[in-house]
Amino acid sequence: MEPWQWPEDEWRQRVDQVRAGRSLKPKCWPGGAKCAVALSFDSDHETNELRDGGTSIGRMSWGQYGNRVGVPRILATLSKADVSATFFVPAVAALMHPDEQRRVIGEGHEIGLHGWIHEVNSTLPEVDERELHLRAADTIERITGVRAVGMRTPSWDFSPATLRIERELGLIYDSSLMADDDPYELVEQGVPTGIVELPVEWIRDDAVYFNMVRFQALRPYTPPPAVLDIFRREFERAYEEGGLFLLTMHPHVTGYRSRIFILEELIAHMKSRTGVWFGTHAEVARYVRAEIE
Ligand SMILES: [Zn+2]
């Protein structure tokens, strides 16, 4: 049957798999703050090549840059600004670089789940997807000593089973969907789940502005100062509205000498405003849950 032939049930059912429910935007943020900032870094490293079944030594070295240079440079920036953030790490990247994960936790940041090997959930049978998420959660806990409470699905890809598995894992938040600027409750098949969505957006993701494809015409067309300008405008409006500014960055994308200033200047700008609260994703999720209930 073609989409234009579908009965109403069919299109409703497709849309209602996972929806945004009630807004969890609080009246004010911790300490009476006007606005919340949640910075996240997806430490994919070598899994970007491995998930595609690749063996490219060049792309593995790009991934290793994320660990050797990107993460240390980002951690130094966060430490200098005294800001806590969240790092989403595929379990295979954590196994490859366990010391990095322990350092991230040791410096007061959060580590969230990001799949096993950056697999694409919607291409997997449910039984495999579940097993990988469970194994990833146990692996991250074994390495860091901390049980993760949130997930950002690899590539922000959601299968019909993903939310169910997140509930089974007892997670308090997801950060992979984009139905709002501010936190909201995820609703599955019409039923509120209690899981907080901390929404992402491609607009607030460094990778879309900077990635290139070597053998196609895809090149970065947005200069770094323009990327900073977009992020700053997203923050400014969040500040005016008393909302959440959530940013996704990647150590192998932003951790470069010519790009790290985006993070540095953005943080400096946000700190120049009064009443800006910086929290990890877990802190934001816990706060909005407690505030609304
Ligand atoms: Zn990723």
Image (tube, rainbow, N blue to C red):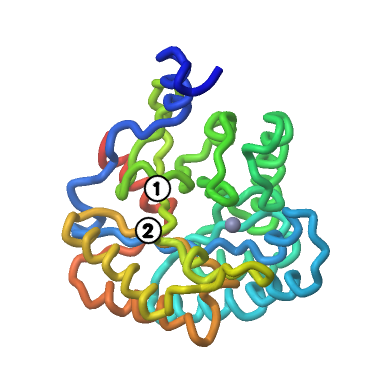
Q: Nearer the viewer, residue 110 or 9?
A: 9
The quarter of the image holding the N terminus is top right
Mark sitting earlier along the chain (1/2): 1
Query: In the drawing, what numbered circle is on residue 246?
Result: 2
Q: Nearer the viewer, residue 259 or 221?
A: 221
The residue indicated by pointer 1 is 198
The quarter of the image holding the C terminus is top left
Left or right? Give the position of 229 relative to 26. right
Check disc 2: other Cα within 10 Å, few if <14, some if 14-19, many if 20+. Answer: many
Give the amino acid type for the residue marked by disc 1 in the picture. Answer: Leu
Mark 1 lies on a secondary structure that is loop
Residue 163 position in % (x across, y down): 53, 33
Query: In the drawing, what numbered circle is on residue 171?
Result: none
Left or right? Give the position of 226 relative to 216. left
Residue 57 position in % (x across, y down): 81, 72
* Disc 1 + disc 2, Cβ < 8 Å: yes
Q: Quadrant of residue 226?
A: bottom left
Q: Nearer the viewer, residue 101 or 129?
A: 129
Q: Which residue appears at 34% of the width and 68% of the height?
A: 231
Q: Which residue appears at 56% of the width and 29% of the height?
A: 160
* Vertical position of residue 270 compared to residue 240: above or below: below
Instruction: Specify whether tag 2 is near ligand 1 (CB below 8 Å).
Output: no
Left or right? Give the position of 124 relative to 245. right
Measure the C-alpha gap from mark 1 to mark 2: 8 Å
Quadrant assignment for ligand 1:
bottom right
* Vertical position of residue 152 compared to residue 9: above or below: below
Q: Nearer the viewer, residue 84 or 246?
A: 246
Give the amino acid type for the residue marked by disc 2 in the picture. Answer: Leu
Mark 2 lies on a secondary structure that is strand
Residue 169 position in % (x across, y down): 58, 36
